[in-house]
Image (cartoon, helix red, strand yellow):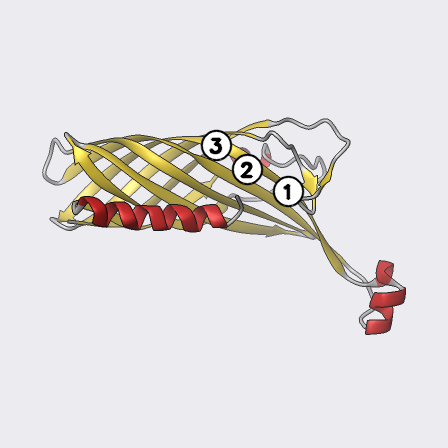
Amino acid sequence: MKKNIIILMMILSTSIIFAFNFGWGGSQIQFIPESSLQQLIPLNDLKINGGMVLYGGSGAGRIANGIYIGGQGESGSLRTGEYEISINQGFFMFGTHLNPFKILSFEVGLGFGGSEIAIKKFVDGDANTIDDFVNSPQKVPYIVSLNTDMFALNTQAKIYLNLAEFFSIIVHGNFIYGFSSDGWKIENTYNLKDTLPTNYYYYTIGAGVMWGF
């Protein structure tokens, strides 16, 4: 999963646009509010001040009667004290694009994909030589991570402000539900003994630009 899923979704999006010869694509940002982000974090002593911004893009190709298929992917990170939180997500999307007005159009869709959450802890140390690394690794500064990979479902709604025939500004909202079959792992390898939730949800709001033809 990890960042490869974002690359896969972006390649898929581009391929779909050219395959159908009628579609749209562009860049977008998403914002996860503080309250939504906090509930994803299993560390009781880690308090988040502010939300997280995700950067990415999306693309889709129209099939018929406003039905589209496409993909999207985003990633972002947030540093708070000795911790860094990062989220990577990607989805295969399908839905309907409605264009009742020339200047405004609407889109609702459903996506299947994945989301990865990683929490890195930066541990200080005062040793910084090769000898320290070999003989006193407990004194060397290091980074340890806590990770979970989730299968995710994304429900999405978008509003397009069509400034030109081929250019639009969008605002959108997403509600994402994820399930992790493996739970949280240290360094994405070692299972935790703690009993932690395996179901997660969060929502995002965002904006972007789209080019279409």
Residue picked out by circle 2? 37
Locate residue 161, reporting x and y percent.
20, 43
Report the residue at 86% width, 72% height from top. Answer: 131
Instruction: Spot the residue most to the right.
Output: 135
Locate residue 184, reporting x and y percent.
66, 36
Locate residue 203, reporting x and y percent.
45, 33
Whether tag 1 and tag 3 are in contact, CB under 8 A, the answer is no
Could you tell me which secondary element the residue under label 1 belongs to? strand
Label 1 or label 3, whichever comes before in sequence order: 1
Report the side of 44 relative to 79 (left or right).
right
How far apart are labels 1 and 3 at the CA level? 15 Å
How far apart are labels 2 and 1 at the CA level? 15 Å
Q: Which mark is residue 147?
A: 1
How far apart are labels 2 and 3 at the CA level? 16 Å
Amino acid type, label 3: Ala
Report the side of 160 relative to 128 (left or right).
left
Q: Nearer the viewer, residue 16 or 211?
A: 16
Residue 23 sits in which quadrant?
top left
Amino acid type, label 1: Asn
Residue 157 sits in which quadrant?
top left
Amino acid type, label 2: Leu
Report the residue at 54% width, 34% height from top. Answer: 150
Q: Is residue 29 visible?
A: no
Front disc: 2 or 1: 1
Residue picked out by circle 3? 152
Report the side of 196 relative to 152 (left or right).
right
Q: Nearer the viewer, residue 213 or 54?
A: 213
**Crowding near pointer 2: few (<14 within 10 Å), some, many (20+)?**
many
